[in-house]
Image (cartoon, rainbow, N blue to C red):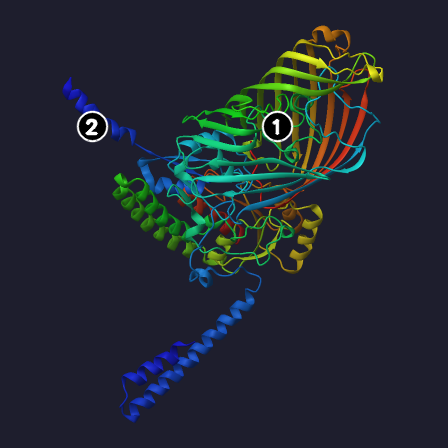
Amino acid sequence: MLRPAILATALAAAFPVSADADLDALRAELKEMKSTYEARIQALEARLQQADAAPVPIAAQADASPQQGTAAGNRFNPDISLILQGKYAHLDDIEHRHISGFLPAGHDHGAPRGFSLDHTELVMSASVDPYFRGYFNLALLDEEVAIEEAWFQTTALGHGVSLKGGRFLSGLGYQNQQHPHAWDFADNALMYRALFGEAYGNDGVQLKWVAPADLFMEFGVEAGRGANFPGTDRNRNGAGSYALFGHLGGDVGASHSWRAGVSYLHAKANERDGDVDDLNDVEAETLFSGKSKTWMADFVWKWAPNGNASERNFKFATEYFRRSERGSLLCVDNTADGGACDGTEDATRSRQSGFYAQGVYQFMPRWRTGYRYDRLNPGSVDFGANNAFLPVSEHKPARHSLMLDYSPSEFSRLRLQYSQDKSMEDLRENQWFVQYIHSLGSHGAHSF
Amino acid sequence: MKRLLVYLALCLPVSAHAALNVFACEPEWAALAKEIGGDDVKIYSATTAFQDPHRIEARPSLIAQMRRAALVVCTGAELETGWLPVLLRDAGNAAVQPGRPGYFEATRFVPLLEKPARLDRAEGDVHAAGNPHIHTDPRNIARVGAALGARLAEIDPAHAADYRARGEAFAARWQTAIARWETRAAPLRNQPVAVQHKSFSYLLAWLGLREVATLEPKPGVEPSVGHLARVATQLQTTPAKMVLRAAYQSPRPADWLSQRTGMPAVALPYTVGGNDQANDLFGLFDDTLDRLLKAVP
């Protein structure tokens, strides 16, 4: 539209002393150009109106300079997400929940009966600089704020090597690194409850190496404070626990993929606290000092037709553990309350095992159903002289769980779960859960 | 013996440098890298045409491939946000981290359409930077190809001349092909179409097709029967010539609508490998046009 005007100005400047005749001819030409332009503009406007609902023609965008794009995941600096979780639980009224034959592992968030709020998770992560990235996960509940994870990880070492430092969930097993919102069931596997309470976290360092091969091979070693169950805080220099893990994985055709691994955890405990009911059925406090060694094996297999998981997919996961502990156990004198323990400290050793296996099937978009079987083996437990005061259970805790979940989008999920829980001797409990998990904010990418 | 050692010493670095490992997030970029890289690159495509690039599992095999990659070629614009960050994090490969020359995002070299006016998850799975399905317009492939050729030359200077030569040859063939496609596609101009997901916005803009309905109620949200019924009613007043879907998408919504309204459901290959004819970038657009023209008499 500007062109005729510019042209006129340019021409006027170029021929300041032209003859009148020339000027008239020029004016006529300009007028004609103007009218043709106007006609063309009208035609264009008509076409624009016609193409009302059509997308913006690329020509209109062609002048726009190419994206000064942001790298994946760096849209917000840092990425922030908030996870809202809560549930309704229909449970029996059981005063002292525990897993028969197993010492209670740390603080266990059993679900209260009725409506309740689960931990609200606040997650932040970002690149620190070209050399490190940072991650932070805070779990919030009434009167309780727990830093679940707060770590840095190197990004520039190369050669498949990365070093992580701070507080992190250990690379042991499969489920261990998943936060509760990523679990496929409303509650934790019995195996993880018995081993770590929720999951094994540590303050320390992790060195990981991925081999340069077609087959996925990952090896890691961790050393840390070891303050969490099965270890304890010991007020010492050096490492209180160390862990080793290795994972292999790959694809079979386009539709199948798998990962398998073996892990080992060595932890030291000093007067590790555990509340159990003694032979007089009175609550007794036990203090364990010694070494705890855990072996774990894990296997995950996923299927999706042609590798396209958005319609239908299936996931199978199983993990197995063996834990042996050796040391001394003190059962604090509780005779004043009518208890059996008299404060004896004696050598103790135990060897226990267990596993879970679960399958989750997405049978149509948004809908998944799953079944999980948990089973633990109390194995052999020897309390030494304390055998006279403390029960040794032969009961093999087990649980069946069935779940159905519905995810309106990848940011929200509603779940119904039924469990038949036989984790306590002489008790068969029917449990019902209705759960919601919602995530706000940046898109959380999930591991395999 | 000495001569043999010298010979080996001369040979080894060359053979160790034989092929540059390229990790392509989507098949279209694998095909483009093949056109420009030729035998100087070894390409791994992380996804196939039958997989939804928004929803890929960060599988161990992908981490293993990412570990050895010298160049990662992805779409960007948050298309791979659900899985690529995990691969980059777990592979321990410093050369392909965002910001390094080994990390290439195609959407950075192309003007994007459909930048959302409102960034709210209530709008579905919105991509803040704009619609990421840029490769459905061949002119974008040319833009990305030029940038990719330059990037390959930067990473692998020993073969820079080869990349340049192949890149120029490809660009010339591609321009000719674009002219051919544009002539063929003349009857498609201004034709109304319905789409399942906004996968074809660039294709439609290029060919001047008009998108009159989207089957997904919101981007990334599966169409429900109720929503499809509303779309069917809407299409009675503003009819469309066909309903388009990508090879990786479920045929059910488009087929259902096709039965209700009588307009043909057209499955476009969407990317290289989406059907037998779309075996390279040229085949992809030849076949896409074949199918579109078949539906518009």
Q: Is residue A173 visible?
A: yes
Taking depth in this image into account, of A228 and A17 the one nearest to the observer is A228
Q: Chain of mark 1?
A: A
Q: Is residue B274 visible?
A: no
Other-residue count near label 1 (Cα within 10 Å), few / some / many at <14 / 14–19 / ≥20: some
In the shown orientation, is residue A341 left or right of residue A200? right
Q: Residue furthest bottom?
A: A20
The residue that appears at 77% across and 37% down in the rendered structure is A116
How many numbered badges does the structure rendering display? 2
Taking depth in this image into account, of A325 and B48 the one nearest to the observer is A325
Marks 2 and 1, how far apart at CA:
50 Å
Q: Specify the amino acid type for callout 1.
A: Lys
Marking on residue A315: 1
Q: Quadrant of residue A62?
A: bottom left
Taking depth in this image into account, of A73 and B156 the one nearest to the observer is A73
Give the x, y percent position of residue A16: 28, 88
Give the x, y percent position of residue A174: 58, 25
Q: Nearer the viewer, mark 2 or mark 1?
A: 2
Taking depth in this image into account, of B268 and A360 the one nearest to the observer is A360
The quadrant in which the C terminus of chain A is found is top right
B221 relative to A382, above or below: below
Q: Quadrant of residue A17?
A: bottom left
Callouts 2 and 1 in the same chain: no
The quadrant in which the N terminus of chain A is found is bottom left
Give the x, y percent position of residue B217: 65, 50
